[in-house]
Image: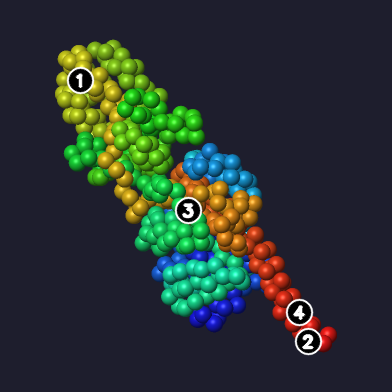
């Protein structure tokens, strides 16, 4: 696309990921006579969509509200989510042939179990609405003008009446989400939160940690965060509730849904207190004291025999080694302090992560443009007229389970519809202004 071809564009959507394609589609559907162009610098469109949910794409969750998100403005998040609820998401994808199924976790996946189904539907919806998608076309600069915006791109300058900015955050940078959107936002008068961190990301453990020897072991667990004092970590003024789900031991540390969920809270807590610990309850609902009492009541059996069936034997043997307990010895032969260390490792295992796997392994970004710089009714910038912002570039990150996608759909819907209304008004005003000189000439 040359600069000349883009000169008459009404709306430019920067970023053609989940939020961008959705915003572009709704902009074009709201005002079909508008020219809507989505540009993206990635070689492959929708790379994040294709890898989401293990390649199945967790489109949304059956129940979504602001408590499922981190961000400094829960009320603003709630207002956006209510404008485009889960029922509308289901209806939209059904319109384009994607039937969703609800799994036991509440997550909604396409019945095909293929993320490609979701991406094809989004691209098909954009095409049906008349959206012009251009890629790879990296936006290098963006400047607000009196009559709109001028974007510098690899294919030359593009002018537009309105811009919808949704280039993603910094997670999975190979997908094109490399943080460039934050520089664009700053150039247009916005600030970025002091912390911009990977979220929904695996945690690393120090070299030699016993859990790293159990690579491939996945177990249901309950996760807590605790400060060195023993106090619970608080979120929005309330103690963080236990996070339940699968935990996967890996060669570098811990992963799995429960760890990804707790990671965004651990990162924020760790920034304030590096001593914050992850407490893994490998036997949810069973306290270390209760397990210790159970062991004491066992007569004539080895430690491993007494624990048989509670956890995989490979895991139990590793825990015994960490507690310096001979698993083949009788329970009564084990010194009290070692026996109690073993029960703590199984029921309240304290882990001090060494860090995270970073943005290259993160599913989303924590931090970004503060929501108080956005008009929640329209998603239009309070700093720059006719600029609309949605998606991951904002300071909103959802927990695992399709919540980040639901934010993309909801914020993209609002931004797209509002940008279309605005661009349509601007176009009408421009037509009136052009006609006035001719009217004056005729009267003279």
* Residues at discs 1 and 2 in contact (Cβ within 8 Å): no
Q: What residue did someone put label 2 on?
A: 441
Upstream in the sequence, badge 1 or badge 3? 3
Query: Distance from label 1 to label 3 (Cα)?
Result: 53 Å
Mark 4 and mark 2: Cα distance apart in space: 9 Å
Query: Looking at the rendered structure, which numbered label has been put on residue 255?
Result: none
Closer to the N terminus: mark 1 or mark 4? 1
- Measure how far apart labels 1 and 4 are at the Cα level: 90 Å
Q: Given this view, does label 1 or label 2 mark the residue nearer the observer?
A: 2
Whether residue 392 is visible, yes or no, is: no
Foreground of the two, 13 or 245: 13
Q: Residues within 10 Å of mark 2 (few under 14, many from 20)?
A: few
Colour pattern of the rendering: rainbow
Label 2 – label 3 distance at C-alpha: 47 Å
Disc with the residue nearer the chain's start (4 vs 2): 4
Tell whether 4 sits left or right of 347. right
Secondary structure beneath label 3: loop
Between circles 2 and 3, the one closer to the viewer is 2
Q: On the image, numbered disc 3 is attached to which residue?
A: 191
- Is 30 placed left or right of 163 in the picture? right
Classify residue 405 as left or right of residue 227. right
* Residue located 29% across and 17% down the image: 292
Which of disc 3 and disc 2 is earlier in sequence?
3
Judging by the rendered image, the residue that carries numbered circle 1 is 338
Could you say whether the residue bearing mark 2 is in a helix, strand or loop? helix
Residue 386, placed above or below residue 444 = above
Q: Quadrant of residue 91?
A: bottom right
User: Which residue carries the number 4 mark?
Assistant: 436
| Figure quadrant of residue 44 | bottom left
**Secondary element at tag 1:** helix
């Amino acid at each position: 696309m040359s600069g000349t071809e883009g000169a008459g564009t009404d709306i430019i959507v920067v970023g053609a990921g989940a939020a961008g394609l959705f915003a572009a589609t709704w902009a074009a559907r709201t005002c079909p006579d508008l020219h809507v162009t989505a540009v993206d610098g990635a070689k492959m469109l929708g790379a994040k969509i294709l890898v989401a949910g293990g390649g199945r794409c967790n489109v949304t969750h059956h129940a979504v509200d602001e408590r499922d998100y981190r961000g400094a403005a829960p009320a603003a998040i709630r207002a956006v989510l209510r404008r485009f609820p889960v029922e509308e998401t289901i209806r939209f994808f059904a319109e384009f042939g994607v039937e969703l199924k609800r799994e036991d976790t509440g997550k909604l996946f396409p019945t095909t179990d293929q993320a490609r189904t979701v991406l094809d539907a989004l691209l098909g919806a954009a095409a049906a609405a008349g959206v012009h998608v251009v890629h790879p076309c990296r936006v290098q600069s963006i400047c607000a003008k009196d009559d709109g915006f001028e974007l510098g791109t690899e294919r030359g300058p593009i002018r537009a009446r309105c811009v919808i900015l949704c280039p993603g955050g910094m997670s999975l940078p190979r997908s094109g989400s490399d943080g460039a959107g934050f520089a664009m936002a700053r150039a247009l008068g916005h600030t970025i939160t002091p912390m911009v961190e990977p979220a929904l990301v695996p945690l690393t453990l120090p070299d030699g940690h016993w859990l790293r020897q159990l690579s491939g072991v996945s177990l249901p667990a309950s996760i807590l965060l605790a400060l060195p004092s023993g106090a619970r970590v608080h979120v929005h003024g309330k103690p963080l509730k236990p996070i339940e789900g699968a935990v996967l031991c890996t060669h570098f540390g811990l992963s799995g849904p429960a760890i990804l969920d707790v990671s965004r809270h651990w990162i924020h807590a760790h920034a304030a207190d590096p001593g914050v610990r992850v407490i893994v309850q490998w036997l949810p609902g069973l306290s270390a004291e209760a397990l210790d009492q159970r062991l004491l009541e066992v007569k004539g059996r080895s430690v491993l025999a007494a624990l048989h069936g509670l956890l995989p034997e490979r895991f139990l043997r590793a825990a015994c080694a960490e507690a310096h307990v001979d698993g083949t010895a009788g329970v009564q032969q084990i010194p009290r302090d070692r026996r109690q260390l073993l029960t703590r490792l199984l029921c309240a295992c304290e882990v001090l992560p060494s860090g995270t796997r970073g943005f290259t392994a993160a599913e989303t970004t924590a931090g970004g443009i503060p929501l108080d710089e956005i008009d929640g009714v329209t998603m239009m910038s309070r700093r720059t007229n006719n600029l609309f912002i949605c998606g991951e570039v904002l300071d909103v990150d959802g927990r695992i389970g399709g919540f980040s996608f639901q934010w993309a759909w909801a914020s993209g819907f609002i931004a797209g519809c509002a940008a279309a209304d605005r661009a349509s008004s601007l176009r009408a005003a421009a037509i009136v202004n052009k006609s006035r000189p001719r009217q004056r000439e005729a009267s003279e």
